Amino acid sequence: MSDSKKKYKSSSQPRAVSASEIARNLGNFETWSSHQCCEQVSLSDLPSDFQEDVDNLFDTTKRIPRSWLDMSFDCSPGFAKFITDASQTAPELFSADLRANNELFEDVCVVFSAWKRLAKMRSSKEKWSEADFVANVYNLFRTSAIRESTFRVQCAISLPQPQDTFQNALDVPRVLNTKTVIPDCAIFIPASRTRPLSHSAKSPYKLLKNHPAVVKAGNAAKRSSFRYQSTPCAQLPDMPGFEFASSFWEDKKPVHALLDDAYRQNRMSTTAAVRHLHSIGIHAPVTGLIWADGVVRAHVDWCEESEGKTVVMSAPYCGPQDRSSSDVFHEWKLDRPSDILQVYFLVRNIDEWTTGKFSEYIVRGVNQMVDKLSSSERTYKPWKWVGDLAPPLKANALKENHNISVTTVVTSDASPSPPKPKSRRRRRRSSN
């Protein structure tokens, strides 16, 4: 039989939808988030242990010398107006106790340049894409704000495995089988700072990796061993060791309605990060920023234990506590001089937090995990999603099999393939 006449059976495994498709469809995201035990909460639900950290992260007050507002300050008329406008809408940005310095002036000049480009884009009446906003405005000042941390673009992040049972419906495996999400930007602790936790024979990484409970919980051939579990990234680092992400950012097309889609997609990234931290005993929040059409929103995510499950909390940032607002999100509009300056200093705070207090949480949590695992005070549970959910049962399936546990997976070596039927040869008749 020729190749053109061969008939192939379609796969019984439904195609997994992408992370962006899940985020764009509210029903798909509800399916994904409910099986991941995700909850959208208020910032007032933040654990008291994190309150000071989050307050410091979003504190952008007293960053610019008030002397810059004096007529004697040597700068261009455009820059002077930019600073004056910022002081009128956000006077808390300025302080009389700060002295002018060249480094700060250079930083704010970069922000001023990004603001001017945005104003030019707005006035041109042209249509601009997401990539245009990123190249001309966002990255102009956010890359300069990240100095100590590692700034990664389009880094694939592994999604966590579901924690709940699922109904035997066609769309559920398609949603839950999604393995990765690709945020536009991710902030990591530099490898040079995590190296001491991983490289020596007595390092926490090696002790955890070789612990019998950890060895038993994974399999390198199935990409579930501790080396895979020690990083939120889908791609392993060249050297075995930990990787930790503190913040994820999602950029969307210049349509304000897409901010909600971006929040849902960014929650998938932050959920992976906090589940990764929780699996190795680290108690720390992770931040997210959403950028679309010159508007920025923020959220803070963390893990809590409830009834034997790891619940992922996500709290939209609604603004300073001393400002009453009925809005779910506080929005920074980058067209405003004060707002673009506040976002710049927020990114600076995230950079300093990543290599500062966040790193301290990492070191403390990993070392405590080694001690508690050795003394059997804590158990180890892998977090990455490996394998696939079984496809939905046919209509004539037994009713008692209607609810399927998410631990059911289909892997390449899960079951032997059925024996191939033997071909029958026609016997040639004799001529006599």
Image (cartoon, rainbow, N blue to C red):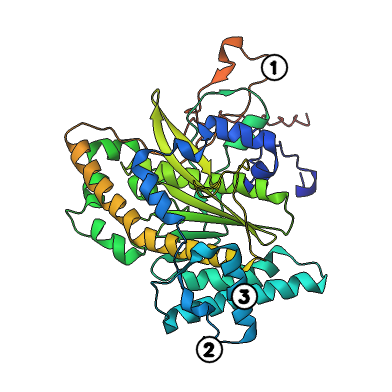
Give how far apart the Cα atoms at labels 2 and 1 are.
Answer: 78 Å
Q: Is residue 100 left or right of residue 282?
A: right
Residue 279 to residue 200: above or below: above
Image x and y of residue 169, in percent = 66, 25
Residue 152 visible (yes or no): no
Q: Residue furthest top?
A: 399
Between disc 2 and disc 1, the foreground one is 2
Q: Secondary structure at mark 1?
A: loop
| Residue that mark 3 sits on | 82
Look at the numbered discs 2 and 3 and tell me whether their residues touch, using CB distance below 8 Å: no
| Camera sees residue 126 | yes
* Amino acid tagged 3: Phe
Q: CA distance from mark 2 to mark 3?
A: 14 Å
Q: If you read the primary sequence from the N terminus, does the residue marked by circle 2 or circle 1 appear first?
A: 2
Looking at marks 2 and 3 on the same chain, the residue that comes earlier in the sequence is marked by 2
Q: Position of residue 289 (x, y in %)?
A: 55, 54
Residue 422 located left or right of residue 411: right
Q: Amino acid at mark 2?
A: Asp
Query: Circle 1 sits on which residue?
Result: 395
x and y, in percent, of residue 280 in the image = 32, 43
Q: Helix or strand or loop: what does disc 2 sit on? A: loop
Residue that mark 2 sits on: 74
Mark 3 crowdedness (10 Å alpha carbons): few <14, some 14-19, many ≥20 = some
Q: Residues within 10 Å of mark 2 (few under 14, many from 20)?
A: few
Closer to the camera in the image, 23 or 397: 23
Residue drawn where x is 80% and y is 67% of the image? 127
